[in-house]
Amino acid sequence: MHDLSPFLNPGSVAVVGGSDRLHSLGAAVLDNLIQGGFAGPIIAVNPHEVRRSGISWVARIEDLRAPPALAVVVTPPHTVPKVISALGAVGTTSVVILTAGLSEEDGLRQAMLAAASRHRVRIMGPNCLGLMAPHAKLNATFARTEALPGGLALISQSGALMTAVLDWAQMRSVGFSGLVSIGDMVDIDLGDLIDLFAADPKTKAILLYIEGVTDAAKFMSAAAAAARHKPVIAIKAGRSPAAAPATFSHTGALAGNYDVYRAAFERAGIVLVENLTELFDAAEIVCTSTAPRGARLGIVTNGGGAGILAVDALMQTDGVLASLDEDLLGRLNDILPAPWSGANPVDIRGDAGPDRYREATREVVRATCTDAVLIMNCPTGQQDAAAIAEAVAREVMDARATHIDKPVLACWLGEVNCLAASGIMARAGIAIYATPDDAIRGFGYLLASRQAREALSDRDATTRVVTRDVIAARRIVEDARADGRTELSQMEASDLLAAYSIPVAAWRFATATEDVEVACTWLKAPYVLKIVSRELVHKSEVGGVVTGLVDGVAACAAARAMEAQIRRERPSARLEGFLIQEQAHRPIAREMIVGIADDPTFGPVIVAGTGGTAVEIIADKALALPPIDHAQALALIGKTRMSRLLAAYRGKPAANIEAVANVLDALSAMAEDIPDILELDINPLLVDPDGVLALDARIRICAATAKSSRLVIYPAPIEWASTLVTQTGTSIYVRPVRADDTQLLAAFFERVSADDLRFRFLNGALHVNHEVISAMTNVDYRRTTTFLAFEEGQAEVIATAMLAADQEGLRAEVALATRSDAKGKGISWTLLEYVLRYAKARGIEIVEAIENAGHHEAIDMEREMGFAVSSDPADPTIRIVTRTFDPVIGD
């Protein structure tokens, strides 16, 4: 059970500050609780007597006969800390605080949180509208509109937005599993609530209204976990106000706040919508339809023009117009009058009535050549829109009764026409829209949610090991900081890139103009000359870059002219010297920009796009949160407009895209290894068929040494790769799983015995399917780690162990499997012992395994390792083995 479950299904509710005073907040909350039909006890806590039918009253929290499962607090701000302390003392641990005005400035927020911490009280709010749990008939808000029970969950950082959604839902008969106005999020935040609704069996889809994320790592982990099983759809407020303009780097300027949120949402599997209309459209379709198995849409319409509009709109999505097979065409020929369209869209003609709609719907919905179906109706004076809707709805429900569950959408064109059919469609669980564009957009959200889930759990990953010298790279950073600098020199930046195997142009540094000619003797002509100055951020804008210098004499002359011009135009700038580089002769090279930007919420962000001096004007960019693997690096390049220029065109050969992806791999590794890096620009990165070359780089580091990783997505714990020796002397190599280990695991499970498969998965399956294996490889390392064991020097997996933690990271389940031919060597013991060490280092307090009662070998081993064994009270064939230990941070 999720630790926040009492918020959705409390046995009793106390309203602290509940009142019978007209128009008071306490009275409004009591009214909603009573009128909503909450079945449990409702208690008003108020020094003044409260006389209301259906509730009881106590003067003080201490007078409560039993701790209420949920408390709603509406008292003045200065009383809230004492209220929380008193509630905790009587045993209430779930509290919603509607009261506003608890700030850090007045100390009330800190006092409230301190009281909550002492008693392990979880707080929703303060400064919120409250929450509704319609299945429990709980309305703990002061909203004026009730919510119907259903499958949508809404988590909103705006109370006003929540009321708008309620009004919309009431008109469309859309129901909810829960609605939460999250308020100031001083304790329970977005990640907590996403986890709550992800675990809630009544929730089919989660809607988010987001103004800002607090704990980004928790949010990303929770959203990804939820999106693997149900659609998560978000609208992000505050698109227009950009983050403060970055003066240091182009990448900082390119990575706008909203664009980083977009990249984060995509990585977490969240479908992003742009406005409330789209949110409503998405909500309607995801709560009525399952994700389609494919993208093929069949269209039935009584108006050819309307069908064409739908096809036009479909081309703007990832959907495709289904090709009707011969079977379906033959059946349609039998039931439709000639001439009908003979193709998709299936135009059943303007005089079509309920019977023709029913027959056409039956055939297209049941056809194997369609993955989803859109039924359209243009209003005519001859036919009754409601009667047609009834016929369609009955046919769709009949199909579902035979387990044909493909999505069916309706579009009754025009508001009046749509209104006539909306109630009928709502009762049948069919999303209905008034325009073809809206209907197709709804279908697009279904496709997007399916694609988001597949990207999380079933993607083709490739891992490329980056050759790097982390010690040398960190020394460069530490030396610059010791020198009192947060910006690396051009030379240091080049050396740092080279430490990560990023090709850089050969260079020399000259402190004075007279030294330039000597420096040139170490390099091949022609040369590029660049000024070195901390004050001159973009050198080309002040004449600080000269190219095409044919020899040392020309370079020396250019240095003198450059110095004179800059001292004349920028006399305050301190000139440190000159950088001389070999000028690359790459006539067909394209210029890219790649780098790392710093986001205040999500930390390091990988940026790629079109480079050069006009980079911010062109504003071609794609963003991704690290860590990324090689396949994700290639996908990032593909999202840029620049990717089309990297392909072959007009006689120009294709550039080496793999080399660009290698650089992005290196940047991802750099962001993981060196959290001190705040911003990094490589601009331009020359790209041609022969590879890449970094011509210029700028790197900014933090002033104080970064103590820990700033990534919000946990990287694979590669530090836990180790060679171990079992009790029998067998040497095994153990490492965390990678996303590209799918084939390794598939081959492993093919060699696991039927009994061991049954013990591992607690079912009778003789084969482990691709979906299960993908879930083991595409993991969120914040919660789950699969360890693979190899016999020393061998490439085949001989044992696996998966450790899956709960959302708090305090409790975890472990499951092992060992190949039959590898048993008897102590491998299972050694692997489990290692996983337990990892769990302790992660701060996990309880590790348990769920075992088949007949798996004596595993149960005996676990008992010997200190696990306690108990029977599952719900299933006598199951044993739960548990080990509890004090966490030891570090290994």
Image (cartoon, grey):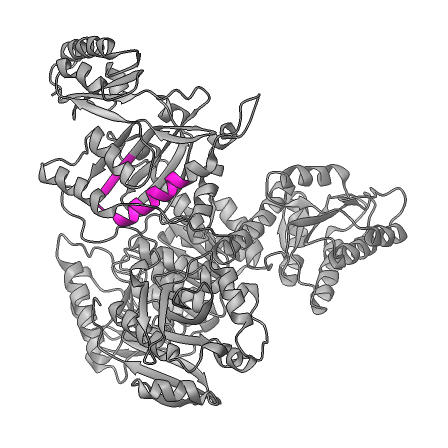
The front one of 569 and 424 is: 569
Split into 4 quadrants, where in the image is the C terminus?
bottom left
Q: Would you identify the image quadrant in which residue 701 lies? A: top left
Q: Would you identify the image quadrant in which residue 46 lies? A: bottom left
Give percent across and percent down for residue 473: 22, 43
Q: Would you identify the image quadrant in which residue 18 lies? A: bottom left
Please say whether residue 318 is one of the residues in the magenta stretch. no
The front one of 621 and 563 is: 563
The front one of 199 and 327 is: 327
Q: Residue at x 14, y 43 (%)?
A: 478
- Figure check: 634 above or below 354: above
**Is there any visible trace of residue 657 in the rendered image?**
yes
- Figure check: 296 above or below 139: above
- Figure check: 743 above or below 728: above
| Segment colored magenta | 662-680
Q: How many marks?
A: 0
Split into 4 quadrants, where in the image is the N terminus?
bottom left
Q: Residue at x 71, y 69 (%)?
A: 401
The front one of 260 and 844 is: 844
Give percent across and percent down for residue 481: 13, 40
- Figure check: 258 above or below 873: above
Give percent across and percent down for residue 490: 22, 29
Classified by dominant secondary structure, the portion drawn in magenta counts as: helix
Q: Residue at x 52, y 57 (%)?
A: 458
Give percent across and percent down for residue 624: 39, 44
**Is there any visible trace of residue 7 in the rendered image?**
no
